Amino acid sequence: MGSRIEMGAPRAGRTAAVRAASPLVLLAGVGKSYGAMTAVEPLDLAVGHGEFLAILGPSGCGKTTLLKMIGGFLAPSTGTIRIGGADVTRLGPERRPTNMVFQGYGLFPHMTVAQNVAYGLRLQKRPAGEVAERVAEALRLGALEGFDARPVTALSGGQQQRVAVARALVMRPKVLLLDEPLAALDLKLRKAMQEELRRIHRSIGGTFIFVTHDQEEAMGLASRIVVMERGCIVQDGTPEEIYAEPKTRFVSGFIGEANMLPGRRERGLVRVNGSLCFPDPGPDGPITLMLRPEAARVATGESPVVGIDSLALRGQVRDIVFLGAVTRYAIAIEGGTLLHVTDSDSELRRRLEVGVPVTVHWPQRSHRVIAEA
Amino acid sequence: MNRMIERMQRHGIVKLGRSGIVRLRGSGGITRRQFTKGALAAGVATSLLGGRSARAAAEVKFMGWQGYEEGLATGDVLAKNDISINPTYMNDNNQLIATATGGGMGNMDIITPDTSYTPMMAGIGMLEPLDMSRVPNFSNLFPEFQTINGTSLDGTQYSLPYVWGSIPLMYNPAVVTETPTSWLDLLKPEYKGKVALTNDVISVMIPFAMAATGTKTPTRITQPELDATIDLLIEIKKNHARTIASGYGELADLFASGEVAIAQAWEPVAIWALDKGAKLDWVVPKEGTHTLCDCLALVTDAPDVDASYILLNHGLTAEAQAHVANINNTGVTVASAVPLLTERARGIYPYDDIPGFFSKTGGGPFPLWPMEREGDIVSMDDMLNGWERFLKA
Amino acid sequence: MRDARSLANLMLLPSGLILVAFFLLPVSYFFVVSFWRVRSYKLQADATLDQYVEVFTGYWVPLLYTFAVALAIALAVTLIAFGFAFYCRFRAGRYGMPLLFLALLTLFGGYLTKIYTWKTILGAEGILNSALMLTGLTDAPITAFLFNPVAVVITLAHYTLPIAILPIFGSLRGIDEVPLDAARDLGAGPCRSFRDVVLPQAWPGLVTAFALTFLFAAGDYVTPMLVGGPNTSMIGVFIQSQFGHRVDAPLGSAMSFTVIALSLAVILGFAGTTRYFTRVR
């Protein structure tokens, strides 16, 4: 219990402090509905200077709508949006101190890389010298030196992505918005671009808000994650908090892999899968026990050694999948439910095979009991 | 052969388009539908009878104005003689020359050239001299048509007058209350903007040459006379005309829609306009005008001479003549056909005094302009140069 | 690889042959003939520019008139077609495609039918005049609607409009909407993003539409004949007359190639001018 708090406390505390001091972006009661259909329920959100915020959720959860309202592409049905203290609710994107990296990038296909990047500055009628200087700087930041004169249509997906980022950053926005920035890239490029984005964020120290449906991307990039479901924010916290302490079944299922075991709590006693019973204070009612695959251990033999505060379930190995660094075991526990456990112990892998009876055990602090509404 | 083509090129230069781009019978409201129906029926008959009609003893290949072939098929002439007609429709007289000399001879039987073209066509050898003993109905023709200009060359008969008409001055009496007497009445200020001409070269050039110069031989004029004619036409076009109609069908529409009240026209225009609700009158102006006469002729090396003669002769029967005139609002060349005409068709042409009519128009069909200049007399090409000047002005 | 290429070439051969036999050869023939002359109705091989001199001295009025009318039509039609296509593509939402289909539907119905329809509308007893008189705006029919160059422009514009809409819509459809948002995001108002993003990408479609319309109008002479009144003789009338009445293929060919060359110049001029105004700055 204690270690959990230690893990999240400093980050959470700092974020809270920043929010309280001077939120850069402040959404108050912002919602969007189309007739009877509500895309985003009225919600509040504060984003501090220097944050790298991920808005995470499945498609149709309202995350892109939220981002477009921040960018000014959609007018909210309710609420106000403030950026840097100024009310921008009624302003179009051209008059907001935000810039966006669009899904699919939205590069101007009839322009070269440099023309794309310079476009916004030209509109501001900046002196030619300044434009050239800032474009060169942005291209350097995007590792695009030497690409100035290339038509953007001749670039690879990753290069186009960097042009889109450079085109937005050259405007020195107060907030950089990114709409599914990596969705169109293949896995390898995605990893590289994640690093690239982190590097850029570090080097300019700006405020980034990005939208993604990919929890790995959110975990890998963001300093803070807002999880959305059906137009509502269901959890808001650091990646560690969200991973370790998902507030709802939806969040736990959405963030990382998780085993879900249904059960009930009565008078502070939780019962799961018939045989498992342990104390856990909270209101009576149905619960879900969430257990990360890497949090559990597999033991063999008649009387395995488990920790004092550990819980254990007996079962039988059904499937073994070697994933490289770890091996994943599918274990059928009593009642037939499959539990997934990952383990990096190669000794264990040699001892196990399909059909072997095993015990799955885990320390109590590494599962989560989530009360069902 | 080369020489013939060369001559053909020299001669085949005139487009006698009474129709312009819109061939008229369509505008008359009668035939396009009829034609389609007929073609359909023929097709059905052919398939039903297992192509019996196609295997008729003789198939006469006809190329002429649409509707003219119907006269040749009246009564039981086809059935009795086991003949079928395979028609192709022409757009102008040049097309006949081009088709006949371009491989048509030996594959075509009957064509319908204009009188003014017959001597030229005979001259280049594309027409068969007619054996008049096989056309006994020739004697049915009004005497004026038996001796009409242009059906014979060097005393040999090459074509048979089949259909006729003229180019009168037509007007809407509701607007033009004073009966016009001269082509120059088109210049009257009160008709300004209500005048039309057609783009039918010959039918414009002949009457307006007569009007501009007083000539009695409008296709035999000098350059100054030609210039005077063109100047007159330009004056009409620039200062009086509402438009130049692309054909007589369009002219009828223009009359019917009230755009035009007085114009150089062709008799059937009055009938078509009447069908569209405009009652028109027409006169032969005192200067005279163009008379046109379409004939039947036999193409050199016609594959089916015997059947063709049967049809040529049949074309001069009262029955055939009346049918063509009734559907096309054209004139008959055979006196005995007049009683068979509908009242309307009979009323168009002055059958009781054809000689008088011809003397009013100036003597019946005129020959074409000479192919080469003859002294002071301008050639066809000069005339066409003048026409272009008119168009350009 | 080589085999695949030679196979592809082989498959192109028939269409290539058709192009050569039915287009290139005849056109080259008439090009050669345009330097010949006709003497007493007979073609004579020569190498003279007389025909071209004659075109410019004898026919410059209809030539000029033709190009003025064609230019007016092409400009008007390209503009209207662009407006319509733009509306269909960016403003009409799901009604865009039905609207476009409706416009293309007007391609059905013959060319002459449309001309006569316009005569019916613009004529003295036409719909327009009847309406004006019925509403008491005028007490006599206005004859100025029909039989003048404006009627030619209206009629041909109506005829060529769907033909012009297609290529423009094609180029507009290829425009991604995201860059439009991006332009706004970077500070461009609607006008700027239209000029900087839409126009440059629509440019090929605009030029195609202009070229199609211009060539159609410059080559047409039936419409002027039917609705243009007495003083509208397009060059096509004279070209037809050279080949038809006059048996003067050299002059007719010279006229044709003059029209082709001048049309090309006009189209290139349009393309260059519009390119200049839509270039990336």
Image (cartoon, coloured by chain):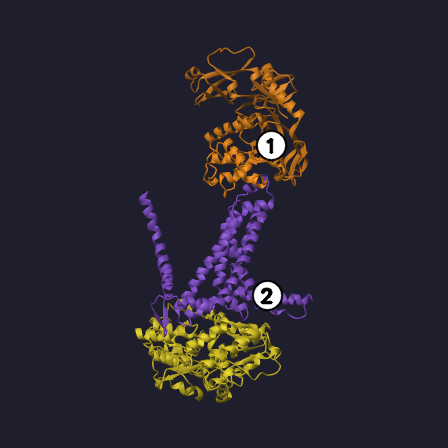
Name the residue located 62 percent from the left edge and 21 percent from the top edge.
Answer: A14
Gap between marks 2 and 1, in whole Å? 60 Å
Q: Position of residue A99 (x, y in %)?
A: 58, 35
The disc numbered 1 marks a residue on which chain? A
State left or right for residue B247 relative to residue C253.
right
Based on the displayed image, in which of its 4 quarters is residue B60 positioned? bottom left
Q: Which residue is mark 2?
A: C121
Instruction: State the residue in front, A237 or A209.
Output: A209
Based on the displayed image, in which of its 4 quarters is residue A354 positioned? top left
Q: Position of residue B82 (x, y in %)?
A: 37, 76
Q: Secondary structure at mark 2?
A: helix
Colour-to-chain, purple: C
Q: Secondary structure at mark 1?
A: strand
Q: Position of residue C228 (x, y in %)?
A: 54, 68
Colour-to-chain, yellow: B
Question: Where, quadrant-wise, is the N terminus of chain A in this rendering?
Answer: top right
Callout 1 environment at 10 Å: few (<14), some (14 to 19), or many (20+)?
Answer: many
Q: Position of residue B375 (x, y in %)?
A: 39, 83
